[in-house]
Amino acid sequence: MTGVQTRTVAPDEADIRLDRWFKRHFPQLNHVQLEKLLRTGQVRVDGGRAKASTRLAGGQSIRVPPLQADAAQPVKGPRPVSPREAETLRALVLHRDPDVLVIDKPHGLAVQGGTGTSKHLDAMLDALRFDAPERPRLVHRLDKDTSGVLVLARNAFAAQRLADAFRSRDTLKVYWAVVAGVPKPHRGRIDLPLAKTASPRGERVAADREEGQTAFTDYTVVEHAHRSAAWVALWPRTGRTHQLRVHMAAIGTPILGDGKYGADKARVEGADLPDRLHLHARRIVVPHPRGGRVDVTAPLPAHMRRTWDWFGFSPDTDGNPFEEIM
């Protein structure tokens, strides 16, 4: 066990959620453990009680209670980024202006650190600094195995405005996925509350109509290969962890390659397809911090292009049924 610690929020950590601050500094402390510490008032911000969703400000003090030794080890500072890694990251940039960066995050790259994750984007953001005086900031996340558009703020002003846009849901996010089976009906809304649960294999998300948080997903089938698989466009109206993966599995059509939520059903019998998650953040439209909008589309990753070819899907189709609300 460790003693009580008091940590100060760094200026470049302004506006991140308290749970994400803990994930960054104490990755061995899982979400369930943190919620218990918050519920009992052992974790405090500037002397007051707080929630996991509390947004932090630079200079605030965080009371960290005694933790088990394996959860109390602070995270080391970001390791130096090699020239090769920096070049690879810069090649991912889809949009860059003085306030906003948008990159095409590849499959397999974690956005933030955690247990067993030593290489992640958050630790390498200095490589995307370019000529800016400030280090880029994360304003939202994608799962490690989800590819596609990821927005970064290049300064504190942009971080605040972009965070507000994501919180208010004044942002359009369109995902492409290939699912096992064909959803019925071909177009609809999934209304299924979700809750995080702890398991021996780590954190999971499950449907929970009693205790879960509201979660809505609009979807449409763009193309399908008989009854075996479908290309689906997804629009998450809320931003819960693993929302799209759990929702598609819940209606009986799990995303291909999603062993966590689809198990053996997340594949197509007899199809020679890559064993990777087939979920791609295709497009994002977000208010620009200084007016107007940033509208960015990411190309399909290689493993999904191969699957498109296998089924004969046409990626030239826009796959966005939500133009009317933009």
Image (tube, rainbow, N blue to C red):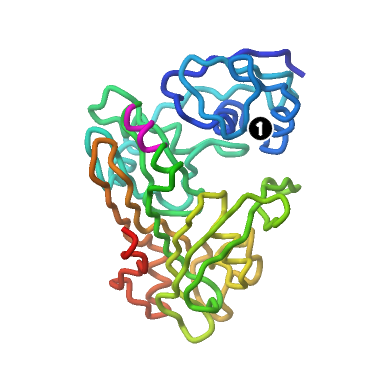
Question: Count of labels shown?
Answer: 1
* Quadrant for the N terminus in the image: top right
Q: Amino acid at mark 1?
A: Gln
Residue at the location (58% across, 37% down)? 114
Taking 228 as reference, is 128 above or below it?
Answer: above
* Side (left or right) of 177 relative to 305: right
* Residue at the spot of label 1: 28
Q: Position of residue 14 (x, y in %)?
A: 44, 24
Magenta: predominant secondary structure element?
helix
Label 1 packing within 10 angstroms: few (<14), some (14-19), many (20+): many
Q: Is residue 160 magenta?
A: yes
| Along the line of sight, the residue nearer the viewer: 89 or 157 | 157
Taking 128 as reference, is 183 above or below it?
Answer: below
Q: What's the magenta region?
A: 157-163
- Figure quadrant of residue 307: bottom left
Residue at the location (30% across, 73% down)? 317
Q: Is residue 54 magenta?
A: no
* Quadrant for the C terminus in the image: bottom left
Q: Position of residue 24 (x, y in %)?
A: 55, 30
- Figure quadrant of residue 30: top right
